[in-house]
Amino acid sequence: MSSATDLAETKHAGEDGSTLEAPPAEPQPQRPQPPLSTKTSRSLSASTDGLVLFDLTNEVGGTLAFSPHCMKSIIDLKLLGVGYERQRLSFVQVRRDLEKRIGQGVTVPSLELSDGSHLTDSWKIAEYLEAKHPRGFLLFPNSAVKSYAASLNEFGKLLAPHIGALTIPQIAQKLDEPSREYFIDSKIGQARFGRLSGLGEEEKEGHVQSAKKMLGIVESSLACEAAKADAGSVQSGGNRWLAGTELPSHADACLFGWYCYTRSAGDAATREIWFEHEHLKKWVKDMIQWCGPEITNDLI
């Protein structure tokens, strides 16, 4: 995990109401984390059992979700109705326990398959699910949607430095002590962490404005889809989602992960970045509703 703003998937460069619509998670007592599962996965099917998704959280036994890339895979699995075991690991557990299980330098999300092999990287996981699941076409309904999702995946790399400047100091405060030490010393680096922690209000606002300006591109796309819907040229419900599909696709997962990551910066910054564009705000609220509390309750 070498990249600062990619809080999981280091192969990619970079990482409401008054509470942003998602109800806050109830405080949970810290509990021991069980050892990584050694279960044998079964084959992929419409009611898939046996898959294991390795995810990132803030502490041993924690449930907070903030990794943009892990969220992509969580949304994909929900879209397909896939049953799976979700193992939430701290930074140190990824480096210590998951490396022993999968190999040195492993990142999350990682998905354990029925034959005991593993896929690492949210895009690779999405392509595997597309190919192997009976309803995998929902992730990429056509080549145009897949191309758009790939563009949004790259777009996240450009968004990451601005959002990361706002979230990294805040995330560090929520980590358990071993993970905080790893996060600051090894993942981010003390010098960079010191710079980000010392940003003034004017510098922070600059990052907010830059992220908001970049998201104007998505706002324009959503406005175009809304106009098509008004003209009756898209399918029912298609104007709700980024690629004009009837249901969310991997394109929506790619961008929603960055909304989830932004929440670590606090309500004010999240609102200013994501909720000052009319159509983007509606899309975020639709995604929150579609994801449901089983996902959104864990968001910071």
Image (cartoon, grey):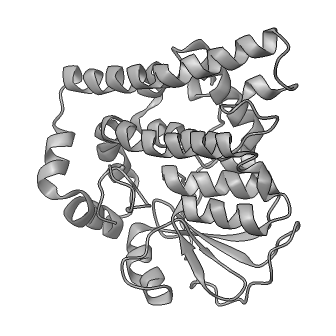
Q: Nearer the viewer, residue 300 or 32?
A: 300
How many marks are shown on the rendered structure?
A: 0
| Position of the N terminus by quadrant | bottom left
Please say whether residue 88 is visible from this viewpoint: yes
180 vs 170: above or below: below
Residue 97 point in image, percent of width and height: 45, 83
Q: Residue at x 20, y 25 (%)?
A: 203
Q: Residue furthest front?
A: 143
Left or right, 229 with reference to 5: right
Residue 11 point in image, percent of width and height: 39, 62
Q: Nearer the viewer, residue 37 or 259?
A: 259
Please say whether residue 253 is visible from this viewpoint: no
209 vs 7: above or below: above
Left or right, 200 with reference to 86: left
106 vs 88: above or below: below
Residue 168 point in image, percent of width and height: 32, 46
Picture quadrant where residue 253 is located? top right
Q: Residue furthest left?
A: 191
Left or right, 8 with reference to 285: left
Picture quadrant where residue 19 is located? top right
Q: Residue at x 57, y 85 (%)?
A: 35
Q: Residue at x 24, y 57 (%)?
A: 188
Residue 195 point in image, percent of width and height: 14, 42
Q: Nearer the viewer, residue 244 or 23?
A: 244
Picture quadrant where residue 231 is located? top right
Q: Residue at x 53, y 65 (%)?
A: 109
